């Protein structure tokens, strides 16, 4: 069964901006799905329509088969949403916020209190449960929104930039948490600017740009299509001009930094042999960007050029 | 993060929409009640202080020189109107500030993404306004009893008029919050419409004492009917037929409630 199915979805805002230009997308139940795109691509509009915060201009959308036009209430009861912007009452405590949210989904207060303890503990917020939420750190606020979204134990969890502004340690522990939720059967749709995050967590991916889906594939297939990688070499001695290293494409970034594009079929031994022949000593080597970032940039740039 | 425990096993069975609506409504009302109590110095205290000053100045100091009004001591005559004034202001203010605050702080989205239908959300917020109106009404009544004896001739009319008035103005507050774009716009109507209509609505005098043109002009003020119905419940006297008051309030409630639900469904000013 599809957790999410959208067909021909369009959205034109009052100011005339056409945010979605006919989106077709399906996400299977149990998937961990990445929805990527540059700023203003239409990701948040798409999520807004699915969660009923934005009214669509045209097209159809359904959640687990429930059409959002005809069975909106049942469709919404299946979704938990973690929005991009903080949107809880800053004057209320985390405990109050999550218990109330459960109530809005019909969960009786005794059950809501048990779940609140479970999720606030899992997200390391239990000690802060009675503090005013405005006093929480940025990372805590993000985790509170995840706990809130889980209170009615939704079948589909939608996370819009859930780790924005969160330090790397907490981000990684949130990844682990989300992986576990997904393994227990919850379908997850994730939008993120951290492409490393999408590459690590998601099995399937769609890239949206200019209001259209420009790519939809398994993550592994997409990464396999990347034919070259760029390596950044730090040199022991400065160079005055870029060396010639055929068949590699080389760029001298500064006098001790060299960027070399290497085809997937090439091995690095040949590159190092050429460098040794020229008397160039390499101190360190790293990937310029992660693989998904590279393919993402190519797809988006291709879309912009078209 | 710690390990998940029995998440999929404990996932709730689908709830009936009737339960979702019932629990959702209760949750909104409990949240509103907790808000009223949490900021009691802003929600409950001002009306008690204002009413005390009114009773001291208009009742004790000036009232003694006014003499009888419709056969009652002036303090006793103005008491129902002052209680009703507090009920009107607090029912309106509670909903307009709470709902606009939720809109401004974006936590209204908690409700908009939930499966609750618009009529439950409107009913929940309005009930919060009625709860605050009732609490303040009781507190101001207690203040009134400190200054004067207050008979209750028709208890059902007292309770009925108080509740219907409270619902009417809570709905008015909801609509104001729906349209408001900034905090200035939630204070314009209470300051420039509600306050004049209340003061000119027979709280402090009987319109029988006004000259002809002013008497006729007063009859288009809906608050006049509410204040007089409430006063009739206590003292058994009214400047207007009590039936009119209840008819006006019921028609207003039906109209305002329908408008609030339709606007929330369309989410004017909330959804894009």
Image (spheres, coloured by chain):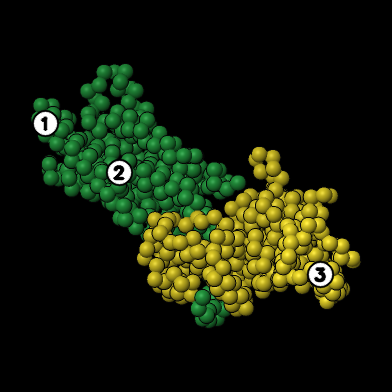
Label 2 is found on which chain of the structure?
B
Pick whichever of labels 1 and 2 is earlier in the sequence.
Answer: 1
Q: Are marks 1 and 2 on the same chain?
A: yes
Q: Identify the residue at image location x=12%, y=45%.
A: B146
Describe residue B102's horizontal placement relative to residue A229 as left or right.
Answer: left
In this figure, which residue is indicated by the disc labeled 3?
A279
**Where in the figure is residue A164, as x and y percent of width and height?**
57, 60
> Which chain is rendered green in the image?
B
In this figure, which residue is indicated by the disc labeled 2?
B87
* Residue B58 seen in the figure: yes
Q: Are marks 1 and 2 in contact (CB under 8 Å)?
A: no
- Give the Cα distance between marks 3 and 1: 104 Å
Which quarter of the picture shows residue A255? bottom right
> Which chain is rendered yellow in the image?
A
Say which element carries label 3: loop
In this figure, which residue is indicated by the disc labeled 1?
B61
Describe residue B272's horizontal placement relative to residue B62 as left or right.
Answer: right
């Amino acid at each position: 069964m599809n957790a999410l199915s959208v067909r021909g979805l369009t959205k034109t805002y009052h100011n005339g901006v056409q945010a979605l230009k006919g989106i077709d997308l399906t996400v299977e139940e149990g998937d961990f799905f990445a929805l990527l795109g540059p700023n203003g691509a239409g990701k948040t509009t798409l999520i807004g329509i699915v969660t009923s915060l934005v009214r669509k201009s045209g097209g159809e959308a359904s959640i687990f088969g429930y059409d959002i036009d005809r069975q909106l209430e049942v469709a919404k009861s299946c979704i938990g949403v973690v929005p991009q912007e903080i949107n809880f009452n800053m004057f209320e405590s985390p405990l109050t916020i999550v218990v109330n949210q459960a109530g809005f989904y019909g969960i009786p207060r005794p059950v809501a209190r048990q779940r609140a303890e479970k999720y606030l503990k899992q997200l390391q917020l239990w000690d802060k449960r009675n503090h005013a939420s405005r006093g929480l750190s940025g990372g805590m606020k993000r985790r509170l929104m995840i706990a809130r979204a889980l209170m009615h134990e939704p079948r589909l969890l939608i996370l819009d930039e859930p780790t924005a502004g969160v330090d790397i340690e907490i981000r990684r522990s949130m990844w682990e948490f989300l992986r576990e939720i997904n393994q227990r059967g919850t379908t997850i749709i994730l939008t993120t600017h951290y492409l490393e995050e999408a590459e690590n967590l998601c099995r399937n991916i769609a890239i949206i740009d200019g209001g259209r889906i420009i790519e939809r594939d398994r993550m592994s297939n997409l990464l396999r299509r990347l034919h070259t990688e760029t390596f950044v070499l730090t040199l022991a001695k400065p160079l005055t001009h870029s060396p010639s290293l055929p068949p590699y494409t080389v760029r001298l970034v500064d006098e001790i930094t060299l960027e070399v594009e290497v085809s997937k079929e090439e091995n690095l031994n040949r590159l190092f042999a050429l460098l040794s022949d020229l008397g160039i000593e390499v101190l360190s080597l790293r990937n310029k960007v992660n693989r998904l970032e590279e393919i993402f940039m190519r797809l988006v740039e291709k879309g912009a050029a078209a | 993060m710690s390990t998940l425990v029995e998440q999929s096993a404990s996932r709730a069975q689908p709830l009936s929409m009737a339960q979702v609506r019932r629990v959702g409504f209760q949750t909104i009302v409990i949240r509103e009640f907790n808000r009223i109590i949490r900021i009691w110095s802003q929600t409950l205290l001002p009306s008690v202080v204002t009413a005390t000053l009114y009773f001291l100045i208009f009742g004790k100091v000036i009232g003694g020189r006014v003499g009888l009004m419709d056969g009652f001591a002036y303090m006793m005559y103005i008491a129902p109107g002052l209680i009703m004034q507090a009920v009107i202001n607090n029912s309106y203010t509670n909903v307009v500030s709470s709902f606009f605050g939720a809109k401004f702080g974006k936590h209204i989205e908690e409700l908009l993404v939930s499966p609750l239908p618009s009529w439950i959300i409107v009913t929940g917020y309005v009930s919060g306004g009625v709860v605050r109106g009732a609490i303040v009404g009781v507190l101001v009544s207690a203040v009134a009893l400190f200054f004067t004896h207050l008979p209750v001739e028709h208890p059902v009319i007292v309770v009925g008029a108080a509740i219907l008035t409270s619902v009417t103005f809570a709905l008015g507050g909801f609509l104001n919050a729906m349209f408001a774009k900034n905090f200035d716009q939630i204070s314009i109507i209470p300051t420039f419409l509600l306050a004049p209509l209340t003061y000119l609505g027979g709280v402090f005098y009987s319109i029988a004492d006004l000259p002809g043109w002013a008497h006729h002009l007063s009859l288009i003020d809906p608050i006049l009917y509410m204040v007089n119905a409430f006063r009739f419940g206590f003292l058994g006297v009214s400047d207007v037929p009590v039936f009119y008051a209840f008819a006006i309030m019921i028609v207003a409630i039906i109209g305002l409630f329908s408008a609030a639900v339709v606007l929330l469904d369309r989410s004017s000013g909330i959804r894009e």
